[in-house]
Every structure is written in structure tokens, then in C-alpha cells.
């Protein structure tokens, strides 16, 4: 005997019809009838008898339902407590955060979301931008807020979800005392033979730099590589070389940001596997960030 069979009997007794009970239980009539027959065989007596007015409980059936009602009440109470306990469980979320989240002032909003959702147990990976897509593929991250290298902004659309948040023009980052810092823009020929800061070889930063150089035929004189954006920006501040990045890096890292000519635009993206986007907390987080960024864009347009 199972609890489910007890609930089936109580439903049939309530509506006095196997067909109507099956509809209410979202079962086929034959499946419900089979369960009733199996239970009656186990008990050794019939639970219902047919009358002109529908099914009637036998004496044994009436006793079964009186005892079964207590089982059903305890079962419903148990299920309710289990659901409440489950709702209090922490949900783990591994979030990769790129430097543009900080430079654009989005990080406080990210933390405000998690403060408002105490069930979410978040782990932040601040160097995720080295290879966001690969980390997501391997299951090392659940989602990421970062920009993707040029040419990879749409990536594998069959597997990944990409949600643009903030779009920024690509700039040449340099020491504020650099003679070129006051120019309205920097043309590609001015970068020929320069010393460039980059991420580790084949990282997202490195792939982005190499794609820009390939696209505009820029021949770099020397490259300094680092696994941290703070180190790269320190080298830029000291005048060791230049780097490519958004205008928002200027104040945040205390460097000059001169727009590249011709124009290039890169977006901070909300990236995750499409399967991960099915999780309600991930969809809620995405909608929250997109609403904030849309509002900021709207306010900027009115200035």
C-alpha cells in the first residue's frame, strides 16, 4: 500500500466516480482503476460498490477512508513542511565579474541584489574574463558579467545566452601626461610600434587585443602580459605602454582614455548557458540588471 493509493481512494469516495476522480488527479481512468484493483487485492476486500447513484463505499471502504483521512492530513502537513524547508535552502551561484562591472559602477547594484535575496549563496570570480565561455562550458561558472573579445560577441548562439548590458566605445588607455592624452581620438597609424599591455596569452584580453591589431594591421613593438587588470593599469599609469579598454576605465584606474579611430564598440554582457537561464534566480538577476542598465541609458540620453 502507498500513500498515493490512499489519496486516490479518498478522491474517488469524494466524487463517487472513478472517471471524475481521474480527471481531478490528472490520471487516465484505466490507470486509476488499476491502482484501485491492486489495493483491493492487497486488502482482500472491495472498497466500493456500484449503485444507480454512483459508487458507494462498502463497510470496509468506509473504515478505510476514516483511517485514511488521518494519513492524508499527516501527509499534507509533512509535504508543507518539506516545501518550507526547501524554500529556506541556500542556492549556490558562481558569478564571474569582469572589470567593466566595477568601472561602470554596476558592482553596488550586483551586491544589492544578493543582499535582497539571502537564499542566494554567491561566489565571485573577479578574473573570470580570462576565458568566460570556456569556464561556462566546463561548469566552473554559472554565469558571467563581462565583455567578450571582438568577433566572439555572439559566440555559440545554440548553447549560450548573451544579454548586452552596457555598450562602450573602445579607447586607447595611456598615462595622463602622454602628449596624445588630449587628442579627440587616436588613429590606427599612431599605434604602430607601440608597447601594449595585455592579459595572459590567449586570454579574453589578449584575444581582443590581437583581433584589433589584426583588423587594422597594427604592428606592436612589445607586449607586457599580466593575469590581473590592476597590474596592467598600473603599468599604463606609469607610462610603460598603452592598453585597449573602455572610457569608463579612465577615472576608475586614473588613466587617460582616448577613443580609437575608426570607432569600435564593445558591450558588457550577461552571459550564461541557455540551460542555466531556466533557473528562476538567474532570470530574475538578468531582468534586474537589464532594467538598471536601461534606466541608466535613458537618463544619460536626457542629459
Image (cartoon, helix red, strand yellow):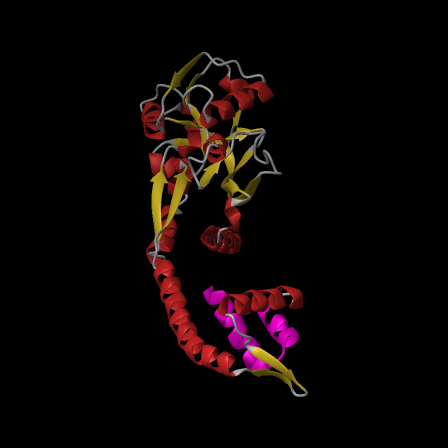
Q: Position of residue 213 (x, y in %)?
A: 54, 20
Q: Position of residue 2 (x, y in %)?
A: 47, 64
Q: Position of residue 132 (x, y in %)?
A: 47, 33
> Does 244 sit left or right of 50 as displayed?
left
Task: Pick whichever, 112 or 277, lies toward us.
Answer: 277
Mainly helix, strand or loop, the magenta region?
helix
| The stretch drawn in magenta includes residue 202 | no
Q: Residue at x 36, y 37 (%)?
A: 125
Height in image: 188 above or below 105? above
> Does 217 sit left or right of 130 as displayed?
right
The magenta region covers 1-25
Q: Position of residue 156 (x, y in %)?
A: 60, 34
| The stretch drawn in magenta includes residue 3 | yes
> Does 28 sit left or right of 107 as displayed?
right
Height in image: 169 above or below 294? above
> Does 183 sit left or right of 87 as displayed?
right
Task: Pick whichever, 41 or 297, lies toward us.
Answer: 41
Question: Quarter-wise, where is residue 177 in the image?
Answer: top left
Q: Number of numbered discs present?
A: 0
Height in image: 141 above or below 12? above
Q: Residue at x 51, y 53 (%)?
A: 294
Amino acid at each position: 500500500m502507498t500513500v498515493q493509493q490512499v489519496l486516490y481512494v479518498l478522491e474517488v469516495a469524494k466524487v463517487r466516480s472513478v472517471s471524475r476522480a481521474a480527471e481531478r488527479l490528472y490520471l487516465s481512468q484505466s490507470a486509476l482503476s488499476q491502482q484501485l484493483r491492486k489495493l483491493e487485492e492487497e486488502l482482500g476486500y472491495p472498497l466500493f460498490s456500484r449503485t444507480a447513484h454512483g459508487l458507494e463505499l462498502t463497510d470496509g471502504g468506509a473504515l478505510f477512508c476514516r483511517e485514511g483521512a488521518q494519513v492524508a492530513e499527516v501527509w499534507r502537513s509533512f509535504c508543507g513542511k518539506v516545501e518550507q524547508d526547501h524554500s529556506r535552502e541556500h542556492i549556490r551561484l558562481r558569478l564571474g565579474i569582469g572589470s567593466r562591472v566595477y568601472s561602470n559602477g554596476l558592482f553596488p547594484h550586483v551586491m544589492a541584489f544578493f543582499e535582497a535575496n539571502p537564499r542566494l549563496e554567491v561566489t565571485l570570480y573577479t578574473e573570470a574574463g580570462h576565458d568566460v565561455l570556456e569556464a561556462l562550458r566546463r561548469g566552473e561558472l554559472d554565469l558571467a558579467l563581462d565583455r567578450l573579445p571582438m568577433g566572439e560577441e555572439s559566440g555559440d548562439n545554440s548553447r549560450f545566452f548573451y544579454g548586452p548590458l552596457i555598450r562602450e566605445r573602445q579607447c586607447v588607455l595611456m598615462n595622463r601626461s602622454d602628449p596624445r592624452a588630449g587628442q579627440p581620438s587616436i588613429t590606427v597609424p599612431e599605434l604602430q610600434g607601440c608597447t601594449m599591455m595585455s592579459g595572459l596569452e590567449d586570454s579574453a584580453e589578449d584575444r581582443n587585443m590581437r583581433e584589433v591589431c589584426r583588423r587594422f594591421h597594427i604592428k606592436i613593438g612589445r607586449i607586457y602580459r599580466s593575469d590581473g587588470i590592476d597590474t596592467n593599469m598600473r603599468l599604463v599609469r606609469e607610462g610603460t605602454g598603452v592598453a585597449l579598454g573602455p572610457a569608463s576605465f579612465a577615472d576608475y584606474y586614473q588613466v587617460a582614455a582616448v577613443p580609437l579611430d575608426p570607432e569600435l564598440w564593445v558591450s558588457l554582457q550577461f552571459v550564461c548557458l541557455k540551460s542555466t537561464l531556466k533557473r528562476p534566480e538567474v532570470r530574475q538577476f538578468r531582468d534586474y540588471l537589464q532594467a538598471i542598465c536601461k534606466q541608466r541609458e535613458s537618463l544619460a540620453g536626457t542629459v
